[in-house]
Image: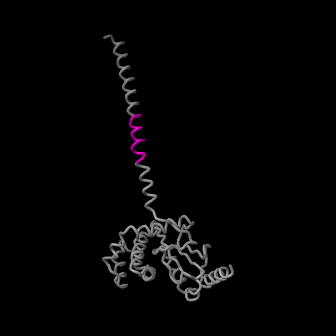
Amino acid sequence: MSKRDQQKLKKEQKRKAAIRKQETQKLLTKVGLYLIAPLFVVLVLFTLYSQGPTYSPTEVADNDHIRGDKDTPVTIMIYADFQCPACATENQLMSRAWISIRDKAHLVFRHYPITDAHPNAWTASLFAEAAGRQGRFWEMHDTMFLNQTLWAPLANPVEEFESYALDLNLDIEQLRQDLESDSVIQKVRNDQRGGTQSGVRSTPTVFVNGALSTASTVTRLVDLVNTAYEEAAGS
C-alpha cells in the first residue's frame, strides 16, 4: 500500500470514529432524556408535596402556638429566632405590654431561625416545638429567651436544652423522639417558608392584624393594639 493510500485510510478511519462518537453521544442524550429527566421530575414533585402548607400573617393555623384568647379581635404575629438578641429584647417588651393588651389581643409565635448568623437557632426551635408536643411550648419559649446568653455561645446546646426540659418536667425520651419527627421539623421549616413568602427577612418581624409593626416601646405597642382593636370593633 502506497503512502498516499495509507494516509487516505487513516483519514477514513478517523472520519468513521468521529461518526461513531457522535452517534454514541446522541444515544446517551436520548437515554438521559428518557431516564434522568423523569427521575428529576419525580424528585421535584416529591420535594414540593413533602412540604406542608404555609400561612400568611393574617391567617392563624391549627398548629400555631397561641398565647391568650384566640377569639380576641387583634392578632399579633411574630416571626422570631430564639438565638437573636433583638428577639429576646422584643420578648421582654411584649411581656411588659401583655398585661395591658391581653384582653384585646392574642399572640402567635412562628419560627424563623436564621442559621447563618445563629447556628443554635434551629436546634432551639426544634426543642421548643417538641416541648409543644407535650403542651409546654410557651414555657420552653420563655426559658429559651431568658437563658439566651447562656446557651447561645455553646458549640452544642443540646445538653443545656435538655436540662430546661427536665426543669419543665417533660418526658425526655418522648422529647428526643419528637425532635427527629417529620411533623416537628416540617413545622419549623413551614413557618420559615411562610415568613419568607410574606416578606420576612430579619427577626423579630411583628405583624398586628396583618400590618407590619415597628413598635419599639411598650407604649407604642399598646397604642397599636388599641387602634387595631377599635378598628376591628367598628368594622
Q: Is residue 175 above or below residue 14?
A: below
Give the quadrant of residue 181.
Answer: bottom left
Q: Is residue 154 left or right of residue 60?
A: left
Instruction: Answer with left or right where residue 195 lies relative to residue 223.
Output: left
The residue depicted at 49 percent of the width and 75 percent of the height is 64
Q: Nearer the viewer, residue 201 or 234?
A: 234
Count of marks placed on residues: 0
Which percent across, then down, holds residue 216?
A: 59, 79
In the foreground, 120 or 24: 24
The residue under the point 35% across, 82% down is: 170
Q: Quadrant of the C terminus?
A: bottom right
What is the x, y in percent for residue 10?
35, 19
Farthest residue to the bottom: give it: 99
Colour scheme in the image?
one colour
Name the spot of residue 34 as percent of width and height, x first.
41, 42
Q: Residue 109, position in %: x, y?
A: 50, 76
Residue 133, above or below 26: below
Residue furthest toward the right?
234
Q: Determine the residue positioned at 49% across, 67% down.
A: 192
Residue farthest to the top, as pictured: 2
Residue 76 against residue 183 in the figure, above or below: below
Q: Is residue 31 magenta?
A: yes
Which corner quadrant holds the N terminus?
A: top left
Residue 234 lies in magenta, yes or no?
no
Q: What secondary structure is the stretch in magenta mostly built from?
A: helix
On the image, which quarter does residue 226 sit in?
Answer: bottom right
Q: Nearer the viewer, residue 110 or 202?
A: 110
| Residue extent of the magenta highlight | 26-38
Q: Is residue 31 above or below residue 57?
A: above
